[in-house]
Image (tube, helix red, strand yellow):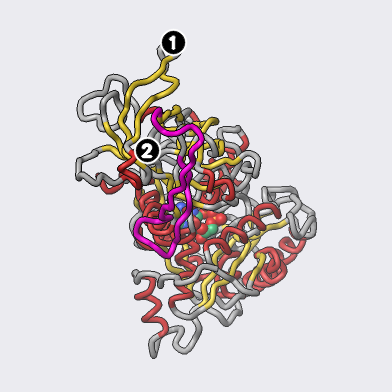
Amino acid sequence: MEENKEVMSSNFIHSFIDEDIAEGGAYYGKKVHTRFPPEPNGYLHIGHAKAIFVDFGTAEKYNGICNLRMDDTNPTKEDVEYVDAIKEDIKWLGFDWEDRFYYASDYFEQMYGYAVELIKKGLAYVCELNGEQMREYRGDLNTPAKSPYRDRPIEESLDLFERMRNGEFEDGAMTLRAKIDLASGNFNMRDPVLYRINHMSHHRTGDKWCIYPMYDFAHPIEDAIEGITHSLCTLEFEAHRPLYDWVVDNISIESKPRQIEFARLGINNTVMSKRKLRQLVEENYVSGWDDPRMPTICGLRRRGYTPKAIRSFTDQIGVSKVNSVVEYGFLEHCLRDDLNENAKRAMAVLDPVKLVITNYPEDKVEEFEVENHPQNPDMGTRKVTFSRELYIESTDFMEEPFKKYQRLYPGNEVRIKSAYIVKCTGCKKDDDGNVVEVYAEYDPETRGGNTPDGRKVRGTIHWVNARDCIEAEVRLYDNLFTVPEPEAEDKEFTEFVNPDSLVVLKNCKLEKSLASAEKSDRFQFMRQGYFCVDSIDSTSDKLVFNRSVSLKDSFKKK
Ligand code: ATP
Ligand code: MG
């Protein structure tokens, strides 16, 4: 678990809670109790991270508690794989449900009991309209809905509902509906369906049930059973709140949770619905749910994101009642902020060319002690070795430099970071004109990269020792989509997958100290960006690094 967690910033939900727990409020003297209710039909994404932060963070702020509940009332596409992944992701984010882990499906029997209670009270009835008829009878703002079965005797509904449960009827033949208000301006209150028939196995209850409760009936009951005080959910449930309240008010249950809605998180250049994320996986646009380009928590984790960066992001975007789209660059900005402070520095050459220091002795090797972090001496130092042959970035040499180019070109002096000043003397090219070696001479008086005579050397380049460096694969990532809102386009969103979103560099040269890097370790490769060891594909024989984020902050520029 992360230490020094920040307390969540205040928002409008907290104002409501403050009123509720004050003297005279509905929850005066009670512990604030929230829940996070994912449907286990996919992996969690950054949008869920916001909901997790709101649910667990709010409980934390009030010294309350938060439950984790699998919202598995739907018998389709649910899987233990997802349940395990959800738990892992929430733990990783630094939140804890302790022993309060529940499945909504465990309440099926109680939900059935409450449905029977509503029928007995004359507040629910069995309806035989099919889906199409129901739509047809729905009415509009000026016309009330029609419901020909609404006045069916209670005894008859009780009998039919029991037979629905016993499997006597086909899918869609009947529903159980609440008897509320056919003329309501809120269509959710026009005798909404509470139960439907679905002869489908459930991943936990098997074939025990062939009727399943609708979300609007099940969710308030789940919350009330668990003693939730504040049921925090996204804005699309706002118009369902009267029904939520109707359910808890009309069944015999003590607890009366309060639903409060907040805006969903949207981020540009990506998609966020589980269905679409699954499609990207199943159609092989990405390597899996944890592909580092995915906006899933496991994808971000593998990319090198830290829990701290994600929490800081969710806190800074705030909680409001207005849906908005946040720039992907802001998420990256939050990661950069964390890694700038906490990642060790190292040198890596991603596109190498050899630099030969022609006046440096053949078998001499020198060691330089360099800082792991320029501002933080507590992060220690490490040794890098220097010899006659180095690797440098091929873009750090130009035979014919463009204006203002301050790196290596014949006649120019450059600082080899922390080592020496060298002067470029030329290069060797192959038959195709590609530079294969660059030549330079070093100035022995400039050890450590200093100029005792005070002369100015503008360029500083990173490097590794060709004699002891290690090889690695480095994966560079870019936006997964080429357009800001792939879902808003008039073509299928997969048409906009960015073909350059993954670039694999096979021949990178890394300083020797990185040989001991462990899975998920994070570094700043100087002048390149922040990188982490890939948690899946990297091995001690063949290191694989992911670029988590570049150094350049596109967000600040805007
Ligand atoms: P999706 O559409 O991605 O499948 P969902 O709402 O069906 O999402 P659930 O598993 O039902 O996914 O969501 C669990 C909780 O997370 C819900 O309370 C939901 O409101 C919240 N949530 C889902 N997506 C977002 C989002 N983009 N921003 C904030 N909260 C979200
Ligand atoms: Mg859902």
Specify few, some or many for label 2: CA neighbours under 10 Å numbering under 14, 14-19, or 20 or more: some
Nearer the observer, 543 or 419? 419
Q: Nearer the viewer, mark 1 or mark 2?
A: 1
Q: Quadrant of the N terminus?
A: bottom right
Is residue 360 magenta-colored? yes
Q: Does ligand 1 reach within 8 Å of label 1's beta carbon? A: no
The CA distance from mark 1 to mark 2 is 40 Å
- Does any portion of residue 190 appear in the rendered image? no
Residue type marked 2: Pro
* Dot 1 or dot 2, earlier in sequence: 1
Residue drawn at x 38%, y 34% is 483
Point out the stretch of residues depicted in magenta: 358-386
Nearer the observer, 385 or 344? 385
Residue type marked 1: Asp
Q: Quadrant of the C terminus?
A: top left
Q: Does ligand 1 reach within 8 Å of label 2's beta carbon? A: no
Q: Are marks 1 and 2 in contact (CB under 8 Å)?
A: no
Nearer the observer, 108 or 408? 408
Task: Using the rendered view, name the quadrant where residue 247 is placed.
Answer: bottom right
| Residue 266 in picture, x, y percent from top left | 41, 49
Q: Is residue 502 above or below residue 34?
A: above
Q: Is residue 25 above or below residue 537?
A: below
Task: Look at the numbered disc 1 and give the secondary structure of its residue.
Answer: loop
Q: Is residue 533 left or right of residue 390?
A: right
| Residue beneath disc 2 | 484
Q: Is residue 267 above or below residue 29?
A: above
Task: Using the rendered view, name the quadrant where residue 544 is placed.
Answer: top right
| Residue beneath disc 1 | 432
Q: Residue furthest top?
A: 431
Q: Is residue 22 left or right of residue 508?
A: left
